[in-house]
Amino acid sequence: MKDTAMNGQLVGVIGLGYVGLPLALLFASAGHRVLGIDVDTTRVNSVNAGVSYVEDVASADIARAVGQSALSATTSYDRVPDLDAVIICVPTPLDAHQQPDVTAIIAAVAELAPHLRPGALVVLESSSYPGTTEELVLPAIEATGRKVGRDFHLAYSPERVNPGSGTPLQRIAKLVAGVTPACTDAAMALYGTVFEQLVRVSTPRVAELAKLVENTHRLINISFVNEMAVHARRLDVDVWEVLAAAATKPFGYEPHYPGPGIGGHCIPVDPLYLQWSLQRAGAESLLIEAAHRVNEAMPEHIAFRLQELLGSLQGKQLLLLGVAYKRNIGDTRESPALPLWDRLEAAGARVFYHDPHVPTLRRGPATNQSQPLTAALLRAMDAVVVVTDHGAVDYHLVAREAPLVLDTRNALAAWQRLGHIRRL
Ligand code: SAJ
C-alpha cells in the first residue's frame, strides 16, 4: 500500500551499488527527494550525470530523477542533518579469513550518527549476521547521546534485489523490523510509500536471520545438485534428465541446476555469515560446511573432467565461455570462472575467454580481453568450457566449430547427441 502522507521526505541512501541505486530511484520515483552518499567519486559523478553503472538500472531513469531534483549524489555526509531517513546499503563481504567484514557498516554509521536530525529514521539493509543492528549500529548511534525510539528510530529491512531477473523491486515483499515498536512504525510508514507488500517481524534479529536463511537454503540446494552432477556418471544417468524429471513434481520440490560453482555476493557469502553467527554461539551448521566444500570443489572437478577428456592440460588451449557469476549479467565477483581459470593455468593450460558482458578480466598481473567468438577461435581451441550460460552467445557456432565442449550449464542441450559435447 502506498502511504502518500509520508511522501516528500528527504531520504539518504548510503551505498549506491546494485542494491542502493535501484532503491534510491524507487524512493525518488515515489515523490521523495533522495540524497545518495557513496565513497566512490566515480559513482557519485555518474549518478549526477545521469549515467548508470548498474546493469538493471537505466541511465534515462537516473537522468529523469536528477533532472527533477528528486535524486542527487555526494561523497559527503554534510547534509545528514537535513535527512528525514537514512538507508544503509553498503557491502558486507567476507574478509581474507572468510569471516564477516562489516567495516563498511561501521564506517557509514560513524559518519552519520553525530549528525542525525531529531526523529530521523535509520534503516540497515545490508545482509549481515543476526545482532548487527542492535549490537553494532544501535550502540554507535546512542554513543552520541541520542536515545532510540525518542531521538531517532532504527530498523532493519534486508535487501531482496535479484540482479538480472527484471522483477520490479517494489513488488518484492519487504521484511521490516524496528528496534522498538515506534521504530517499526516509522520504517513501515516510509517503506509503505514504495513497496507493495511489507512484512512486519518482531525484531531486527528475526529479519537479519531470515535473510541469511533465504540464501543458505539456496546454497544448500544448489550444492546438492552439484554433488549429484559429480556422481551421476557413476550411476550411469544424465543428471540433467533426472533434474528435469524431478522438476515435474508440483509440490515439495524447488528446481536447482548444477553449475561450475556458486558466485555472486549473496549466495556464497551469506551462509558463511550464518555459520560465523552459529560458531559465535557455540554451534555449527554441518550442512553449510558441507555445501561450501562441495561448491569450492567444483572448479577442481571441471579440471579433472578436462584432464579425463584431453589427457594432460599442459600446453592445451582452453576457452572459457562466460566468466560472469551468472547468466546475462557482467558481474564477475566470486565467479567460479576465476578459480577455474587459475586451476587450469596451474595445470599448464593457456586460458582464453569470451563473455559478451565482460569486455576485460584481470587475472593476476594480466588484463585479458574477451575474445571475439569466431569459427577460427573455436577451431584453435583444444576445448571450450561453458561456464556461464549467457543468452547472447551463438551456441550453434560453438557446437559446430569447437572440437570439444565441456558444458557445465547444459547450454548446448540441443546438441547433446553430438559426441564432442560433454557435460559435468
Ligand atoms: N546457481 C546455480 N544453480 C542454480 C541457481 C544458481 O549454479 O540452480 C548459481 C548461479 O550461477 C550463481 C550463484 O548460484 O553463480 C548465485 O546465483 P543466484 O541465482 O542466486 O543469483 P544472485 O547471487 O544474484 O542471488 C540473488 C539473491 N537475492 C538476494 O540476496 C536479495 C538470492 O537471494 C536470490 O534467490 C537470487 O538472486 C535469485 O533467486 O535469482
Image (cartoon, grey):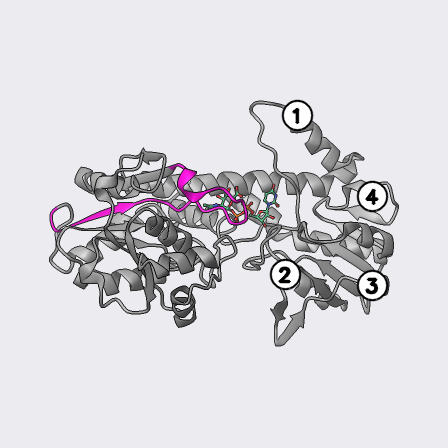
Return the disc, 1 or 3, that comes first in the chain's sequence: 1
* Label 2 SS: helix
Q: What residue did someone put label 4 on?
A: 415
Residue at 16% across / 55% down in the picture?
142
Q: What residue did someone put label 3 on?
A: 381
Q: What residue did someone put label 1 on?
A: 248
Residue at 29% across / 39% down in the picture?
192
* Residue 393 in view here: yes
Going by the numbered disc 4, the residue's amino acid type is Trp
Return the disc, 4 or 2, that comes first in the chain's sequence: 2
Find out whether the residues at labels 4 and 1 contact each other: C-beta distance under 8 Å.
Answer: no
Residue 328 picture location, percent across and down? 61, 51
Separation of disc 4 and disc 2 at Cα?
28 Å
Foreground: disc 4 or disc 2: 4
Give the residues in magenta.
150-173
Foreground: disc 3 or disc 4: 4
Going by the numbered disc 3, the residue's amino acid type is Met
Residue at 39% across / 36% down in the picture?
173
* Residue 92 in view here: no
* Label 1 SS: loop
Q: What residue did someone put label 2 on?
A: 339
Return the disc, 2 or 1, that comes first in the chain's sequence: 1
